[in-house]
């Protein structure tokens, strides 16, 4: 094991508590494992650690207990997916203010050779002022010194690699620190020209420290750019950013979403302005809107429109909690919406990069929906305001900043949404979004994330399909065609044509059934009531 029980003995000096017997058992299991590294002992430790995590992960007494954090480290060491475990630690807020979390995770990643990820973990801890902060900064400094030596040793190889890259197809990681720094250098001179961009070389000047919002935000008032924002609650959070619902100047009718990020990251604002410029006016409401950005030296604050109807993930969960499944008519409707969204987006030279149900907000029409099939298909009348809205552009890719032949590599780091190409370490482009669409459709149909399997084709090749079968009363032909085509995109395929053909196949089915729109209206009405009550 890479993570050992160093200092775990210190846990036993504490007074009796529910966690203590588990720590004793885990220590004994580790001692047995070190004495006899058998598979039986290894499995016993893995089970003890997993059971301990499951027992105490929702116990508030353990939330800031460093002993419990060390159990998580053992669990992380047993897991093949570091990032999903770290994400769970974040969601449960286990010792987020303790520098031990970030130092240990960074060392873990460094040992695996994932230096960029290790660097990001250090930066995340420092941005959160994890204590003791000086210890964390010192560890980060030593890390940078170590990778500096590695970088110098590899410089000759890198120069040769760069020269070779020019001869063939360019392949870059769009989310690496070096790529992000490069594209930010390209766009920063242009940001000042965009409406709503406000830059200051100083730290955020407000009386309320933005870092305190992580612990307590409700009804706090912060002044940004001469306007008062009354925080009404946290609407979401990620690795480097938190999103808050806020009223402008205490006006309950003027509600916005504030995305507060440290270190500052103006890329998302740039992406929103590209959407403004490139998308047709009638499509713009499907892609979120940024009103303004305040860019300080320590934080960036993105002010966006706030949609109050929940996310597509909320809609899926509303069925799961009552043991039901989303109606097929509603699954088809949202599939048509997502195909249309990606068709529109990709034709403008933009990739979203984080296409998942959490980032698809529900849009509800302000007036009653009609039975008019033509309005439904062409998205006219009340159907224009009904559907989905794609937000969170922090991982967006602007293809116009890269050469036309550029392909991408690298992992999206979102558990369950890594496309086939990422898993097989092959170049990818639009697949990062189309695979996300497949996962979402699978979640709507099955209430589960998608697992796929590799099958042998008649010509001796192979193709991919979801493991779970379709239910016999579904329109199997439509769903099978969707997954078969989107999970097996070839470099020579015209993927925009593919998206259009898939969308049209679903729309043709809708038009063939006069009762479809009536059933859909009823399903949307029930969904709206369900999400409102939640």
Image (cartoon, grey):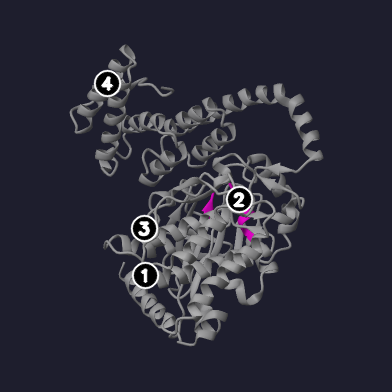
Residue lying at 26% horizontally and 29% vertically, measured from the top left: 48
On the question of residue 296 being in view, the answer is yes
Q: Earlier in the sequence, mark 3 or mark 1?
A: 1
Which residue lies under the disc numbered 4? 29
Residue lying at 31% horizontally and 40% vertically, measured from the top left: 63
Q: In what element is the residue under mark 3?
A: loop
Measured Cα–Cα span from mark 4 to mark 3: 37 Å
Which residue lies under the disc numbered 3? 447
Measured Cα–Cα span from mark 1 to mark 2: 40 Å
Return the residue nearer the eye: 114 or 522. Answer: 522
Say whether marks 1 and 2 touch (CB < 8 Å): no
Q: Nearer the viewer, mark 1 or mark 4?
A: 1
Which residue lies under the disc numbered 1? 327
Image location (x, y in percent) of residue 250? 45, 70
Q: Earlier in the sequence, mark 3 or mark 2?
A: 2
Outermost front residue: 458
197 up-or-down from 130: above or below = below
Which residue lies under the disc numbered 2? 265
Image location (x, y in percent) of residue 374? 54, 85
On the question of residue 233 being in view, the answer is no
* Magenta-colored stretch includes residue 195: no
Q: Quadrant of residue 445?
A: bottom left
Image location (x, y in percent) of residue 289? 58, 67
Q: Earlier in the sequence, mark 2 or mark 4?
A: 4
Q: Nearer the viewer, mark 1 or mark 2?
A: 1
Q: Which residues are magenta?
A: 259-271
Say whether marks 3 and 2 touch (CB < 8 Å): no
Q: Earlier in the sequence, mark 4 or mark 3?
A: 4
Residue lying at 63% horizontally and 67% vertically, measured from the top left: 344
Q: Earlier in the sequence, mark 1 or mark 2?
A: 2
């Amino acid at each position: 094991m890479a993570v050992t029980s160093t200092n775990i003995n210190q846990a036993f000096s504490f007074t009796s508590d529910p966690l203590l017997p588990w720590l004793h058992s885990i220590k004994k299991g580790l001692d047995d494992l070190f004495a006899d590294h058998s598979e039986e002992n290894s499995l016993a430790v893995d089970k003890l650690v997993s059971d301990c995590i499951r027992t105490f992960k929702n116990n508030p007494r353990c939330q800031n207990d460093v002993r419990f954090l060390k159990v998580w480290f053992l669990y992380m060491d047993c897991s093949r997916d570091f990032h999903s475990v770290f994400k769970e630690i974040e969601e449960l807020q286990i010792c987020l203010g303790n520098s031990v979390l970030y130092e240990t995770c960074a060392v873990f990643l460094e040992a695996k050779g994932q230096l960029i990820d290790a660097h990001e973990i250090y930066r995340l801890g420092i941005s959160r002022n994890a204590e003791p902060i000086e210890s964390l900064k010192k560890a980060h400094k030593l890390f940078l010194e170590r990778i500096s030596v590695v970088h110098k040793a590899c410089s000759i190889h890198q120069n040769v690699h760069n020269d070779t890259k020019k001869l063939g197809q360019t392949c870059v990681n769009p989310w690496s620190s070096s790529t992000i720094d490069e594209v930010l250098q390209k766009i920063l001179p242009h940001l000042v020209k965009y409406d709503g961009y406000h830059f200051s070389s100083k730290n955020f000047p407000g009386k309320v420290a933005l870092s305190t919002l992580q612990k307590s935000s409700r009804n706090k008032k912060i002044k940004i750019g001469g306007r008062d924002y009354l925080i009404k609650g946290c609407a979401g959070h990620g690795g480097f950013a938190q999103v808050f619902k806020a009223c402008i100047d205490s006006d309950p009718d003027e509600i916005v979403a504030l995305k507060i990020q440290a270190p500052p990251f103006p890329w998302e604002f740039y992406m929103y302005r590209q959407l403004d410029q490139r998308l047709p006016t009638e499509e713009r409401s499907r892609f979120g809107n940024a009103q303004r950005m305040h860019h300080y030296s320590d934080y960036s604050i993105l002010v966006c429109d706030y949609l109050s109807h929940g996310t597509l993930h909320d809609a899926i969960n509303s069925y799961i909690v009552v043991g039901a499944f989303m109606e097929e008519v509603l699954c088809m409707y949202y599939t048509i919406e997502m195909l249309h969204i990606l068709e529109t987006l990709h034709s403008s030279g933009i990739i979203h990069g984080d296409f998942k149900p959490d980032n698809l907000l529900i849009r509800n029409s302000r007036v009653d929906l009609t039975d008019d099939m033509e309005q439904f298909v062409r998205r006219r009348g009340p159907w224009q305001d009904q559907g989905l809205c794609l937000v969170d552009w922090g991982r967006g890719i602007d293809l116009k900043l890269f050469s036309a032949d550029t392909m991408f590599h690298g992992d999206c780091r979102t558990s369950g949404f890594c496309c086939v190409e990422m898993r097989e370490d092959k170049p990818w482009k639009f697949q990062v979004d189309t695979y996300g669409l497949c996962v979402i459709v699978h979640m709507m149909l099955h209430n589960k994330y998608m697992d796929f399997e590799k099958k042998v084709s008649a010509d001796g090749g192979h193709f991919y399909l979801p493991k779970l079968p379709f239910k016999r009363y579904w329109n199997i032909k439509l769903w099978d065609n969707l997954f078969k085509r989107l999970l097996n995109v070839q470099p020579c395929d015209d993927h925009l044509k593919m998206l259009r053909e898939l969308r049209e196949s679903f729309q043709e089915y809708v038009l063939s059934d006069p009762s479809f729109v009536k059933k859909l209206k009823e399903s949307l009405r029930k969904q709206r009531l369900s999400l409102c009550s939640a």
